[in-house]
């Protein structure tokens, strides 16, 4: 038998789960147009399943309490994540489970609407809305169960957090990407910081400013979520090869704000000369934890 040439297509393999939409996998370029799969595609499919294994238990937990599960994918782009979740979990469920894709680029919203209609994914909606509009829009539920943001660039992850907090989401799943805002403020204030604080040596060199700024951004996000009453788990999203930004943040709403984490967040901002970012990394008002204990 002749040896296989690396990278040549092979027949569809058992990696494809029963009931999965072959048409969707073609649209996501996991399968070729003739329904075949090669080694690169096989790796990509394993990465998709790896991401799904983090999200599926959260969906199962919500589903165990009520059938009308709602998930909002913020900064959805081409809505690949939403389509995968719908195909693997939402499709065929009883009740009225729904996935909403929020995206500011109208051409991507139109493309996703066309694909959902072609696939018969009736429980998907795509909305061309800003963050502020999505919080106020009556086209979205007053409360949602799960908010996701996959590789939402720079401040788009913070926008997803703002939306999730406003909607009191039970779970928040974030894979941040291309974080530049904090690094830009560190860079702007670097001269004064180096004179005042020995810690500024951590980000004195430009490459360190970028790397430290990216790491610090996620630290601030975790403190913010904890301050608002979420339990936070941070891990690595192994195998998602399309970006070096591989940090996965999963937050579970526990209800009561944590004043100590709010204090630590604000102290960190002040220590590092990032006071101007307090509006972005906002914390609950003082007394919110006491108010949460009061009977309604």
Image: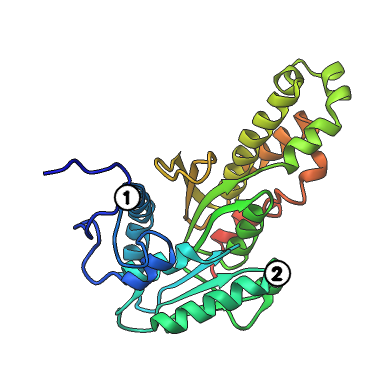
Q: Position of residue 165 (x, y in %)?
A: 60, 61
Q: Is residue 165 left or right of residue 93?
A: right
State which quarter of the image contains the C terminus.
Answer: bottom right
Local SS, label 2? loop
Residue under numbered circle 1: 46
The residue that label 2 is drawn on is 130
Q: Is residue 121 visible?
A: no
Q: Give the vertical position of 117 relative to 50 (above or below).
A: below
In the displayed structure, 228 sits above or below 132; it is above
| Residue at the spot 83% in from the left edge and 23% down from the top edge | 193
Q: Which of 8/145 is in front? A: 8
| Residue ID at (76%, 15%) | 198
Q: Which dot, 1 or 2, sits closer to the camera? A: 1
Instruction: Pick the residue in front: 244 or 190.
Output: 244
Query: What's the coloring here?
Result: rainbow
Q: Is residue 108 above or below residue 68?
A: above
Q: What is the spatial separation of the Cα atoms under label 1 and label 2, in whole angstroms? A: 33 Å
How many numbered discs sit on the rendered protein?
2
Identify the residue at image location x=31%, y=52%: 38
Q: Secondary structure at mark 1?
A: helix
Can see residue 161?
yes
């Amino acid at each position: 038998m002749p040896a296989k040439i690396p990278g040549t297509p092979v027949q569809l393999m058992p990696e494809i789960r029963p009931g999965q939409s072959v048409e969707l996998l073609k649209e996501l370029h996991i399968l070729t147009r003739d329904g075949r799969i090669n080694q690169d595609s096989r790796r990509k499919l394993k990465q998709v399943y790896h991401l799904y294994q983090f999200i599926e238990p959260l969906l199962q937990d919500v589903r165990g309490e009520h059938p009308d599960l709602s998930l909002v994918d913020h900064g959805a782009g081409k809505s690949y994540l939403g389509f995968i979740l719908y195909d693997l979990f939402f499709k065929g469920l009883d009740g009225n489970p729904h996935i909403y894709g929020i995206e500011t680029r109208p051409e991507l919203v139109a493309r996703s609407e066309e694909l959902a209609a072609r696939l018969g994914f009736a429980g998907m909606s795509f909305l061309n809305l800003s963050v502020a509009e999505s919080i106020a829009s009556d086209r979205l539920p007053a409360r949602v169960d799960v908010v996701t943001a996959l590789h939402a660039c720079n401040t788009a992850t913070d926008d997803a957090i703002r939306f999730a907090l406003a909607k009191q989401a039970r779970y928040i799943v974030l894979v941040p990407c291309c974080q530049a805002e904090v690094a830009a403020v560190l860079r702007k204030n670097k001269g004064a910081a180096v004179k005042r604080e020995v810690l500024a040596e951590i980000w004195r060199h430009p490459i360190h400013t970028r790397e430290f700024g990216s790491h610090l951004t996620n630290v601030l996000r975790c403190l913010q979520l904890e301050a608002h009453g979420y339990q936070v788990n941070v891990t690595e999203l192994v195998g998602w090869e399309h970006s070096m930004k591989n940090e996965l943040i999963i937050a579970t709403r526990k209800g009561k704000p944590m004043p100590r984490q709010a204090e630590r967040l604000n102290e960190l901002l002040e220590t590092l000369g990032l006071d101007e970012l307090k509006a972005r990394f906002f914390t609950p008002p003082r007394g919110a934890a006491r108010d949460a204990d009061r009977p309604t």
